[in-house]
Image (cartoon, grey):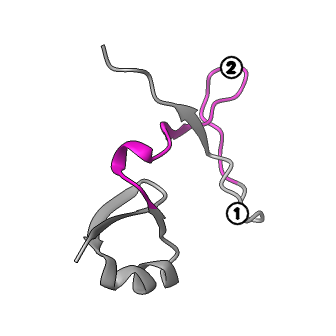
């Protein structure tokens, strides 16, 4: 049976196609290969002074982290 790649946030795993429904119910998305994964990473958000921003627990979004493109490897 074919292997598929599943991605959720930063988690990336390879599993059989038989488990596709199981992983989709857990919120994973199916991607073609690990190279097809977005080239972004989560980093701590900073304010104008360069200090870390805190998360506001009253909102569903986490303001303490932002997505940033990964630098290309040389």
Secondary structure of residue under mark 1: loop
Above or below, 36 against 50 in this view is below
N-terminal of the two: label 1 or label 2? 2
What is the crowding at mark 1: few (fewer than 14 residues within 10 Å), some, or many (at least 20)?
A: few
Is the N terminus in the top left, top right, bottom left or bottom right quadrant?
bottom left
Whether the magenta-drawn stretch holds residue 47 is answered as: yes
Q: Which numbered dot is residue 57? A: 1
> Residue pushed farthest right?
58
> Residue pushed farthest left?
1
Q: Position of residue 20 (x, y in %)?
A: 40, 80
Above or below, 50 against 34 in this view is above
Q: Measure how far apart labels 1 and 2 are at the Cα level.
A: 22 Å
Whether the magenta-drawn stretch holds residue 59 is answered as: no
Magenta part mainly helix, strand or loop? loop
Which residue: 44% across, 22% down?
A: 71
Is the C terminus in the top left, top right, bottom left or bottom right quadrant?
top left
Q: Position of residue 66 (x, y in %)?
A: 62, 41
Q: Is residue 29 left or right of residue 34?
A: right
Pointer 1 and pointer 2: residues touching (CB < 8 Å)? Answer: no
Above or below, 58 against 26 in this view is above
Residue behind mark 2: 49
Which residue: 65% across, 46% down?
A: 54
Q: Is residue 17 left or right of residue 30?
A: left
Q: Which numbered dot is residue 65? A: none
**Which region shows up in magenta?**
31-55
In front: 67, or 37? 37
> Residue pushed farthest front?
1
Image-quadrant location for residue 14: bottom left
In front: 5, or 72? 5
Secondary structure of residue under mark 2: loop
Q: Position of residue 52 (x, y in %)?
A: 60, 34
Q: Position of residue 35 (x, y in %)?
A: 37, 42
């Amino acid at each position: 049976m074919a292997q598929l790649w599943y991605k959720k946030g930063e988690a990336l795993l390879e599993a059989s196609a038989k488990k596709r429904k199981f992983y989709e119910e857990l919120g994973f998305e199916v991607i073609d290969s690990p190279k097809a994964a977005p080239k972004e990473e989560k980093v701590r958000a900073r304010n104008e002074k360069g200090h870390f921003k805190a998360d506001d627990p009253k909102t569903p979004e986490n303001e303490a982290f932002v997505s940033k493109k990964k630098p290309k490897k040389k």
